[in-house]
Image: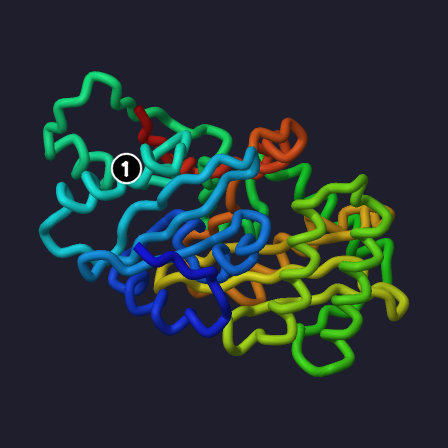
Amino acid sequence: MDFKKLTLKDKELFQKYINPYKFLSCEYSFTTLYIWKDACDVQYAIYKDALIIKKKDFEGNYHFMQPLGYKEDLQGILEYLSQYKIKNGMKYIFKDLEEDFIEKIKALQIEDKNMYIKEDRDNFDYLYEAEKLIKLSGKKLHGKKNHYNSFVKEYSYEVKEIIGEKVISDVIRAAEKWYCENNNNDKMLYYETAAIKDLVQNMDLFNLKGIAVYVEDQVAAFSLGEKLNDKLAVIHVEKGDMNYRGVYSFINKTFVDMCFSDVKIINREQDLGIEGLRKAKLSYYPFKLEKKFILGY
């Protein structure tokens, strides 16, 4: 296979393969792949008319995502990828697998005692009901509603769509400022910040929605997301200045209300095993954790 580095020019090709699926996972979004194209060295090839995506995880281990667009010869594709894995010393053959694909693998009844399938908890996606994120009603979300109200009462703010040269420039400046303040030589944060610049300068091309929250003419928070299908939207980026009390509760609620009130499900991506991030995501009480699996041997 002749693997090529993912570029912006590949969006149309990827959409052709991705669109027939109704993924609940954020992994199979072109935008997600593009954000991490450098950090995860995202590459692709076409084999037997299927899209094969190869990338590395944040620990540096290369793997394939599940093939997209294959017709019937899944067994043949798996055999070829297994040979490639062995030849290239890859730790896993697959990561980012959805549950229905795991069932297809099991149905093949592959006789290999060394093969294993395991849940990848750190990469489970958090799925929420959009209506609950907007209303913040009920006892469970009472604290979030209080944080939201605190922001509204305490600050003179303005919410703007991320369109136009001025807002785009302000968002880039805020992203760079927060990166410089918090990077601690974090390469992932570096790559994410670089990707944010690309995203906000190509909002239409990525089919993104975005808002920036201003307090006293300064960006206090911004968020970017997209509709993956009629029932699901993904929040790709959410950044805020913690010096503004309640800013995250405010932008979380406001972004969904303004841009994604017409979908049922909001995917707020994974927690990567980071304790604080896991606690924050669980505090919004997801109705489901979308499982992802690893296949190796």
| Residue at x 81%, y 53% (from the top left corner) | 178
Towards the viewer: 125 or 245: 125
| Residue at x 81%, y 46% (from the top left corner) | 242
- Residue 297's spot in the image, x, y percent? 30, 24
Towards the viewer: 76 or 184: 76
Left or right of 191 in this view: 133 = left
Residue denoted by label 1: 99
* Residue furthest out toward the top: 113
Left or right of 282 in this view: 71 = left
Q: Check disc 1: other Cα within 10 Å, few if <14, some if 14-19, many if 20+.
A: some
Towards the viewer: 12 or 55: 55
| Residue at x 18%, y 35% (from the top left corner) | 105
* Residue furthest out toward the front: 87
The relative height of residue 31 versus residue 242 in the rendered view (above or below) is below
Residue 139 in view (yes/no): no
* Residue furthest out toward the bottom: 164
**Image quarter in which the N terminus is found:** bottom left
Left or right of 251 in this view: 25 = left
Q: Quadrant of residue 154?
A: bottom right
Which type of secondary structure does the marked residue at label 1 adopt? helix
- Residue 150's spot in the image, x, y percent? 79, 48
Name the kind of residue labelled 1 in the image. Answer: Glu
Towards the viewer: 10 or 205: 10
